[in-house]
Image (cartoon, rainbow, N blue to C red):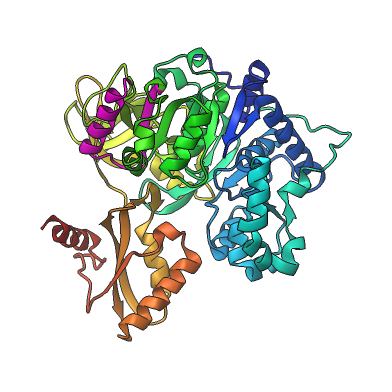
């Protein structure tokens, strides 16, 4: 395995670009950006960040973007400088953005115009520096004019006289490069390069600190996972519908293809129609998505009958457990199209960049989450931290070069996540068979995957309990036909005006939580069940509620 641990992510992509200058690096809404042009835009953005915004090595910059070219341009520009990219969901409410901005000591926020427009009065008083991106900035010319003229009019009207406060990305592109070019900072494997916000292995929201090496290590295993060589995949695309603030999206669908000279096919908002359009323009090599992506693709006749379907090499599903029936239906559809592609599941966690084991064409076993990736070790531990024999259930633990550096400003949680001999405890239960395949069974930590996005019931509960009149609450998981899973909250209220309380709770949730965490259902109860220790018994509520859906 050829991994140069002296390179930053920027340098690794720069090296790939030097070998593939004329090849497409990024595909977006019908527009193809070559490696040469992409790196030119990255270098210009690095120049702007240093000379116009005074961003320096070690500074933290908040980046909240959908899957548009700007997210990659800004990310690699920051990485070139040696700054830390603080990834946040692009539609995070203002109060949450402000909290993360302050907690991480960010010096600049690069935000999405559509989100700012929703809370423009709050952002008017934001005392930090802001750069704004727009969905149309990298669209092909005709689409750009149409979108700017007709689709973006309402947003411009909302921003109104405050628009001048936010420097637009398109404006910055006209910036003339400085006479002092920005040099790429040498990689330090012990320094933070990326912050991702996720749950700790106990299910409480944490900020996870990751290095350049963690991402480069994962990207270097492309051939092993895809079971094709970089030369065979050269010029082909990898579908990128998973978001940049998600380790799976950033590490696998964005950095991995660019590291290896492929095309990162950016889809800002998933639809089967958008995927088919991309397949018309780019030969797809690998599909990556949550189970819901594959369900929607199977409903689209244009996808199923696409002439290039038989040329797709692999498909991977993550973010949540894939239904056996869905896997079988997708595999059958690929077979019927004359394709060798099959959809495979893997396993990972943000603390180790999203993937530590995976099924592949070469090694796969039904119901398993695959074998560990080369150079990664997986063990099953008992409650005392001892490794158990094959077939015995225990906690899944990992040793990997892609492991996190730490939880930001939380030495106690960091220490608790690792055993004395260096195993990263995942908070998930499973077992390993005699052939080395790992089987996931259940989560120890409280986390709900809503459309593949991690939502933490404890965070929802903490917010709901601040609503006036709420005495106690408990959040659980419920099935949802569109999102796969959603959040339900049981509430004990002091004032029993049900409709009024529901509106108030939802107002709070929409203001302070990402949209996936907003409760789909709210049920008022006189009391909640408690454990012997006096804690709310969320397991009992979950079990009782699950029975309703089994009838």
Left or right: 412 in relation to 472: right
Horizontal relation, residue 165 to residue 151: left or right: right
- Residue 273 picture location, percent across and down: 44, 42
- Residue at 79%, 33% in the rendered image: 182
Report the residue that reaches farthest toward the left.
Answer: 551
Q: Position of residue 33 (x, y in %)?
A: 64, 31
Q: Residue at x 66, y 46 (%)?
A: 144
| Vertical side of 237 occupied by 453: above or below | below
* Whole-percent x, y for residue 59 in the image: 69, 45
Relative to 30, 551 lies left or right: left
The image quarter in which residue 296 lies: top left
The residue at 32%/60% (across/down) is: 487
Quadrant the C terminus occupies = bottom left
| Viewer-nearest residue: 96 or 82 | 96
In the rendered image, the vertical position of residue 208 relative to residue 96, given as above or below: above
Is residue 188 shown to the viewer in this render? no
Left or right of 177 on screen, residue 162: left
Q: Residue at x 53, y 14 (%)?
A: 2
- Front residue of this view, candidates 377 and 54: 54
- Residue 393 visible from this viewpoint: yes
The count of marks equals: 0
Q: Is residue 330 magenta?
A: yes
Q: Which residues are magenta?
A: 312-338
In which quarter of the view is residue 550 placed? bottom left
Residue at the right extreme, as displayed? 179
Seen in the picture, residue 113 relative to 418 is either above or below; the reply is below
Task: Tell me, yes or no, whether the highlighted magenta stretch contains residue 386.
Answer: no
Give the x, y percent position of residue 219: 50, 25
- Along the line of sight, which residue is nearer the eye, 405 or 117? 117
From the viewer's side, name the closer residue of 269 and 531.
269
């Amino acid at each position: 395995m050829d991994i140069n641990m002296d390179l930053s992510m920027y340098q690794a992509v720069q090296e790939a670009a030097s070998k593939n200058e004329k090849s497409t690096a990024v595909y977006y809404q019908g527009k193809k950006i070559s490696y040469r042009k992409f790196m030119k835009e990255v270098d210009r953005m690095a120049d702007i960040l240093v000379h116009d915004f005074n961003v320096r090595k070690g500074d933290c910059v908040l980046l909240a973007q959908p899957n548009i070219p700007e997210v990659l341009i800004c990310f690699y520009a920051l990485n070139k400088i040696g700054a830390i990219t603080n990834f946040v969901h692009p539609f995070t409410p203002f109060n949450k953005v402000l909290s993360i901005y302050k907690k991480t000591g960010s010096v600049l926020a690069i935000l999405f115009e559509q989100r700012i427009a929703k809370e423009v009065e709050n952002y008017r008083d934001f005392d930090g520096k802001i750069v704004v991106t727009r969905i149309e900035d990298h669209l092909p010319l005709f689409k750009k004019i149409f979108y700017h003229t007709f689709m973006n009019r309402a947003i411009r009207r909302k921003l109104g006289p405050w628009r001048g406060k936010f420097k637009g990305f398109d404006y910055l592109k006209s910036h003339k490069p400085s006479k002092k070019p920005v040099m790429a900072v040498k990689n330090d494997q012990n320094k933070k390069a990326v912050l991702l916000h996720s749950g700790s292995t106990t299910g409480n929201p944490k900020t996870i600190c990751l290095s350049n090496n963690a991402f480069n290590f994962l990207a270097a295993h492309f051939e092993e996972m895809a079971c094709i060589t970089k030369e065979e995949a050269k010029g082909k695309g990898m579908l990128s519908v998973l978001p940049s603030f998600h380790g799976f999206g950033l590490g696998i669908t964005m950095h991995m293809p660019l590291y290896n000279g492929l095309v990162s096919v950016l889809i800002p908002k998933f639809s089967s129609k958008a995927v088919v359009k991309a397949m018309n323009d780019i030969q797809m090599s690998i599909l990556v998505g949550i189970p819901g992506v594959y369900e929607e693709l199977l409903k689209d006749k244009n996808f199923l009958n696409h002439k290039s379907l038989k040329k797709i090499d692999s498909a991977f599903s993550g973010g949540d457990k894939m239904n056996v029936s869905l896997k079988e239906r997708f595999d059958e559809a690929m077979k019927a199209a004359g394709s060798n592609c099959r959809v495979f599941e893997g396993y990972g966690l943000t603390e180790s960049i999203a993937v530590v084991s995976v099924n592949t064409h070469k090694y796969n076993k039904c119901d398993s989450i695959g074998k560990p990736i080369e150079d990664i070790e997986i063990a099953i531990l008992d409650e005392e931290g001892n490794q158990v024999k094959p077939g015995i259930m225990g906690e899944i633990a990992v040793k990997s070069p892609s492991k996190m550096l730490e939880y930001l400003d939380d030495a106690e949680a960091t220490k608790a996540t690792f055993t004395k001999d260096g195993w990263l405890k995942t908070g998930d239960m499973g077992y390993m068979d005699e052939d080395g395949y790992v089987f996931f069974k259940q989560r120890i930590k409280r986390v709900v995957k809503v459309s593949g996005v991690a939502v933490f019931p404890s965070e929802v509960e903490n917010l709901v309990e601040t609503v006036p009149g709420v005495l106690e609450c408990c959040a659980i998981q419920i099935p949802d036909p569109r999102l796969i899973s959603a959040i339900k909250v049981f509430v004990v209220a002091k004032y029993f005006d049900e409709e009024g309380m529901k509106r108030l709770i939802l107002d709070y949730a929409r203001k302070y939580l990402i949209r996936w965490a907003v409760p789909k259902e709210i049920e008022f109860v006189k009391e909640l069940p408690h454990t012997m220790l006096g804690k709310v018994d969320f397991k009992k509520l979950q079990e009782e509620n699950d029975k309703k859906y089994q009838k």
